[in-house]
Amino acid sequence: MDKEATEIHPEWDLVIEPQNSLFELHLKDVWRYRDLLWLLVKRDFVSFYKQTILGPLWFFIQPLFTTIIFTFIFGNLAGLSTDGLPQPLFYMAGITAWNYFADCLTKTSTVFRDNAGIFGKVYFPRLIMPLSIVVSNLVRFGVQMLLFFVMIVYYLVQDETGSLFHPNIYVCLFPVLVLLMALLGLGLGLIITAMTTKYRDLAFLVSFGVQLMMYATTVIYPLSAAPEKYKWLIELNPMTGIIEAFRYGFLGAGVFTMSTFGYSVSFTLISLVLGVVIFNKTEKTFVDTV
Amino acid sequence: MNTAIKVENLSKIYRLGEIGTGTISRDMERWIKMKVLKQEDPFLKIGETNDRAKKSKSDIVYSLQGINFGINQGDAVGIIGRNGAGKSTLLKILSRVTTPTTGKISVKGRVASLLEVGTGFHPELTGRENIYLNGAILGMRKREIDRKLDEIINFSGVERYIDTPVKRYSSGMYVRLAFAVAAHLESEILIVDEVLAVGDAEFQNKCMGKLSEVSDVEGRTVLFVSHNMAAIKKLCKKVIVLENGHISKHVGVSEGIAHYFNIQKDSVEIKDIERQLEMIDDDIIEYQTVKLVQQNMSVFDVHNDMEFKVEIRYKIKNRVTGFRLFIYLIDKYDAVISQTFFDEDNSSGTAMNPGEYITEFVFPPNLLIEGMHKIKVLSGLHDIRMCEPRDGININISIIETGLLRRKQFPEEYRGLITLPVQVVTKISI
């Protein structure tokens, strides 16, 4: 059953010992429990539906209204640049992508706290829970992308000169970008949830930190409009590269360079590995500290 | 005989009290001592045995200490002990919910553990959907559940409501469905924690039947924790008796149960009461013993589904009139919840001749709520004086939920201390 265990102790199926090696991640176990992952995703989706009148319409309402408000405040009142793109389209692209990342991050960052009940009563690879969150959010993200596509089609029809925006080949990066956002949210979320089991302060930081981080990302302004002095700071944010690439692919405006993209990829991978290792170490004893 | 579970030198420490300020510095201290100076874990040394009644000097206690045992394949073994003896910790470690501090457990075969029925049930989902979800949480593959679905629904006896959200279920139906899923796990080893104490008598019998079938017919290994000695006797051939984190006996079932009751008899509570009795010096009454008795045995962990008695043996030295024996049930702030005395209908008081007496205050089943309670024994002469210091004789009772009255799931502030014999009648109003 447990491969690691049977290799070291051939006569036993399972050996329980105090502190296993840091990198014993039981990924095989995670694979064995893949059915649970799907059932949890289904549960999230069904239970979301059942409690509401508007049901999946709620998925649309939030990005739609945010876009309207942003267009009004940042576009019309503050007059921030949108790289020449129609304002609603510009904000919608940023919001859709940012929401997915932010949802993954905030929801995974409370995994231990939210599931203390189940985790305290039954064993299954804990990693299944955050993974199911990331996948559940994908459903919501997909629905919001539909709204974004509808807007693109609308502007395509309106735009007779064909000069407003230019989708290009980098659109093919889309699946990679989604994966990056998911893994980045997951990685950072795992680090935070593991730390909050011991040091509660972090929990307060998350919701508020995510909000602030949005303003340090190119959601409401393009990177090209950022003041030269602070540009490096904004580029240091791994989400900037992802959102810029997202806009560049779909709308043809944004700063897309291999170096910023490469930075986002490496940042994501490092935080993911770090997150999984820390999470894995915490899951064994968190029942005693939470 | 093949060994199914081998436990070697197993220990688990817990830190008492709030975990908060100071943990970072203490973590650093521990880390430096262990990794840099290569010393033993500093926390392991200051630990002491886990006796819940004694106030500990350090805030580190051993919940389990140096446990060794082996369990043969196909055995049904009961684990018993007083509240806080380490039973739940042992089960949690065996089910991999938490890890041991030291030691090693080797297991042969797949382990399924039932520390709670219906873990992960979602109220909005239907019975059928919850079977899948709960089964997957317990480690079943979807195929496996598909194959057993009919059997599970049949066993649960809730066919009619299987496509209704479980939030509309009665608590009995809920438990039936949850147990049905768990009972159909395919595993060589089954770990069960006191889950049977729910549901009606018929369903409890069904569960017990299923568990015996699992161990006798299918030859699977069963570890069973319960406060219900009748169930232990019925199901298990051997028991492990835990006492303050140690194994005090690993023997045949009748010997083990007798030992379990003996532990309670020699407990610190007894000594505490003896000390209080010695301090009373009165010319009317001399107390001999004050005991809590359940099923004719002296106990301190009282099962709430059976009646129990406060038994007071005393000597009256001189003939008196108006002598009264009281007991008070008090809460943690020393407020009186109820008062009872032995001749409530006779306000003038009866005359008592010198001699030895036994007075029993019999409490009905399902009266006190799970948790720690305090009872005070006092005696006095009607309208004249009390016979002992104002405070009386204090007895601590720990009530364990073993019957249908389940309040443990509610937060403490909603549970109350006692249940009243209130009948609930709901009708459709016309």
Image (cartoon, rainbow, N blue to C red):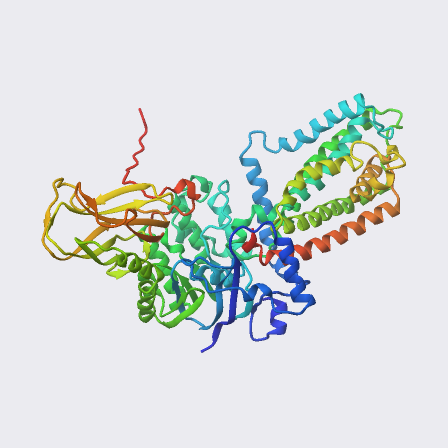
Relative to A175, B85 lies left or right: left
Residue at position x 27%, y 40% in the image = B421
Q: Report x, y in % for residue B142.
A: 55, 54
Is residue B430 positioned above or below A281 on the image?
Answer: above
Q: Is residue B220 visible?
A: no
Q: Report x, y in % for residue B15.
A: 53, 57
Q: Quadrant of the N terminus of chain B?
A: bottom left
Q: How many marks?
A: 0
State the residue lying farthest toward the top: A77
Residue at position x 65%, y 65% in the image = B33
Is residue B254 positioned above or below B163 on the image?
Answer: below
In which quadrant of the rendered view does residue B230 lie?
Answer: bottom left
Q: Is residue A2 visible?
A: yes
Is residue A127 positioned above or below B4 on the image?
Answer: above
Q: Report x, y in % for residue A266.
A: 80, 52
Is residue A164 positioned above or below A245 on the image?
Answer: above
Relative to B239, A175 lies left or right: right
In which quadrant of the rendered view does residue B249 lie?
Answer: bottom left
Q: Nearer the viewer, residue B32 or B236?
A: B32
Q: Nearer the viewer, residue B106 or B27?
A: B27
In which quadrant of the rendered view does residue B190 lie?
Answer: bottom left
State the residue lying farthest toward the bottom: B1
Q: Report x, y in % for residue B197.
A: 36, 53
Residue at position x 61%, y 65% in the image = A19
Q: Nearer the viewer, residue B286 or B161?
A: B286
Q: Quadrant of the C terminus of chain B?
A: top left
